[in-house]
Amino acid sequence: MEVNLGKIPFDLDFHPSSSLVAAGLITGNLHLYRYAEESPPQRLLNVNAHDESCRAVRFVDSGRIIATASPDCSILATDVETGNTIARLEDAHGAALSRLINLTETTFCSGDDDGCIKVWDTRQRTCCNTFNAHEEYVSDMWFVSNSMQLLGTSGDGTVSVCNLRKNKVQSRSEFSEDELLSIVVMKNGRKVVCGTQTGALFLYSWGYFKDWSDSFRGPSTSIDALLKLDEDTLISGSEDGVIRLMGILPNRIIQPIAEHSEYPVERLAFSHDRKYLGSISHDQFLKLWNLEELLESGLNASKSLVAAAKSDDDEMDVDVKASSKKGSKIKASNSNASSMSTFFADL
């Protein structure tokens, strides 16, 4: 299934319990669709959410609210049923917002272009945590619920670990020579995997965040989006428009599973029942892929590779330090994170 959004999308998110998917557009509009296997997706809402682009979209408050974020520094809360505005925070950040993620049923997190991360309470409509985690834009975040820690990646090439209980930046990696664009936690919490601008994957061992312990070359183009499929495999979206199945420890590209278009895959997301994989790109289309069909052959290949390399996995906790990568620090903004920067002139 696919939807022509009419304009370039920046983000998408699936409802946590219903067959709904939302997309934020470069025009500042928010689109909400209902999808079903037997019919084309039906648009339910078209909300003029922001005067500038709608960079980030998340269902919050158990799916009753859609939160959107914009370079105009505002966060908007929209009612899913009616499309009415519930609340608008005009000066939520001091810089353009870049990312939103869910934490709990009543809290979510936002990141901006100056590297600041904030945690918001939907009941009180207030900020409850603030972290000056990075020096450049926040590209992605991951929440570890059992330890109440928030991991962030940035265009400055660092990984941050924010402790929500102590309200402080607990750890921060050295500056790498590459922009970090995406992040997932795998191997039962023992490995943190980051996608980069050059197409490499950096692996950090939990508790040893100063420098990456392992890396391998993925596609030849930037890895803009990562989704954790299980503890051993992930799905990546790249600048070349290809969606790939990749294995971690053993590190390898298992196989391409879909091609969105010739343009970069900006975001990937799973539906609430994990039946569909959603992808967006600069071709202005939102595509919903049947995940079972995509992975039917890929998962079989993955299981064979993991079984064959079981001994490699047993040694994964050894944190082998790579040589220091201190040097020229990459200075970049979210507007030039890829070679398709002309599409992001408004940012």
Image: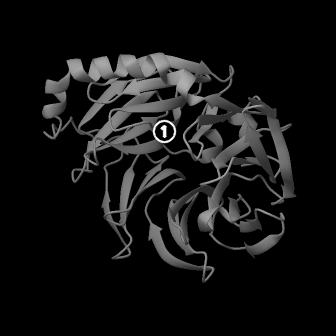
**Residue 345 position by quadrant:** top right
- In the image, 303: left or right of 46? left
Q: Position of residue 301 (x, y in %)?
A: 37, 16
- In the image, 290: left or right of 327? right
Query: Residue at position x 47%, y 28% from top?
Result: 198
| Residue at the bottom extreme, as displayed | 124
The residue closer to the viewer here, 278 or 221, is 278
The residue closer to the viewer here, 98 or 106, is 106
**Residue 110 position by quadrant:** bottom right
| 297 vs 322: above or below | above
Looking at the figure, which quarter contains the N terminus?
Answer: top right
The residue closer to the viewer here, 340 or 21, is 21
Q: Which residue is mark 1?
A: 227
- Decide: few, some or many residues near mark 1? Use Cα within 10 Å; few <14, some 14-19, many ≥20: many
- In the image, 302: left or right of 74? left
Residue type, label 1: Leu
- In the image, 309: left or right of 12? left
Query: Residue at position x 86%, y 58% from top?
Result: 48
Colouring convention used in this rendered image of the protein: one colour
| Residue at the front extreme, as displayed | 38
Q: Position of residue 25 (x, y in %)?
A: 77, 46
Whether residue 1 is visible here, answered yes or no, is: yes
Query: Residue at position x 68%, y 25% from top?
Result: 263
